[in-house]
Image (tube, rainbow, N blue to C red):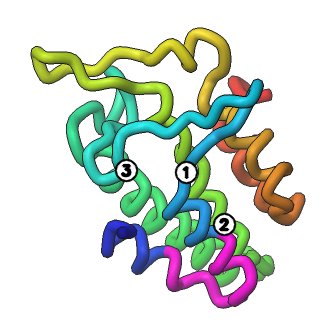
Amino acid sequence: MLNPKIEAVANKIRNEKLRKKVIEFLENPTFEVGGKTYSGMSLDVSPAGLSHHHCYAGGYVEHVVSTAKIALTICDCVEKVYHGKVNRDFVLAGVLLHDIFKPLTYVAKENGSYATTSLADYMDHLSMIIAELVRRNFPIEVVHVVSAHHGEYGP
């Protein structure tokens, strides 16, 4: 079952086809490679990071929801101040999916902290999500939003 806060953000995507694709992915955040399917901890309990931000249980949801609020505020500014046109559906899809595979790369330790999984030894979350977005036939605009979210540190 999808976290209600994440679902509320997903439901702001107006394009029904894109909204359904995003929700399907959020409900089934698995990654297949080499004949093996990887799934991680629940989005509800996953941190969003190991040390820099939202590095606690439930941090993933808080990170995604707060990032969506920030992104929509920036969309408002671009449209009102600069008279630009922003496709909010692509922005929201990118926000919702940009870290979807972080839970696959984290494991909870007995002391309450987190460590990386063996999958993270081979691939980072961003490389996995880009591959999976292409595999699931997401629009190139969404692939771009996700692939660019690390700025100069991304691919």
Q: Residues within 10 Å of mark 2 (few under 14, many from 20)?
A: some
**Where does the image place residue 64, in percent across and percent down from the top left?**
43, 56
What's the amino acid at mark 2?
Val
Which SS class for mark 1? loop
Compared to residue 139, the image places residue 36 above or below, namely: above
Q: Which residue is mark 3?
A: 43
Please tell me whether mark 2 or mark 3 is closer to you in this view.
3
Q: CA distance from mark 2 to mark 3?
A: 20 Å
* Residue 152 visible (yes or no): yes
Q: Residue at x 68, y 42 (%)?
A: 129
What's the amino acid at mark 3?
Leu
Tell which circle, 1 or 2, labels the residue nearer the N-terminal end.
1
Q: CA distance from mark 1 to mark 3?
A: 9 Å
Which SS class for mark 2? helix
Which numbered disc covers residue 29? 1
Compared to residue 138, the image places residue 144 above or below, namely: above
**Where does the image place residue 112, in percent across and percent down from the top left?**
13, 23
Q: Residue furthest left?
A: 111
- Quarter of the picture containing the N terminus is bottom left
Q: Residue at x 66, y 34 (%)?
A: 126
* Residue 92 visible (yes or no): no
- Quarter of the picture containing the C terminus is top right
Tell which circle, 1 or 3, labels the residue nearer the N-terminal end.
1
| Residue 57 sits in quarter | top left
Region in magenta: 10-21
> Is residue 139 found left or right of 118 in the rendered image?
right
Which SS class for mark 3? loop
> Is residue 5 found left or right of 153 in the rendered image?
left
Tell which circle, 2 or 3, labels the residue nearer the N-terminal end.
3
Q: Which residue is mark 2?
A: 91
Q: Residue at x 56, y 34 (%)?
A: 38
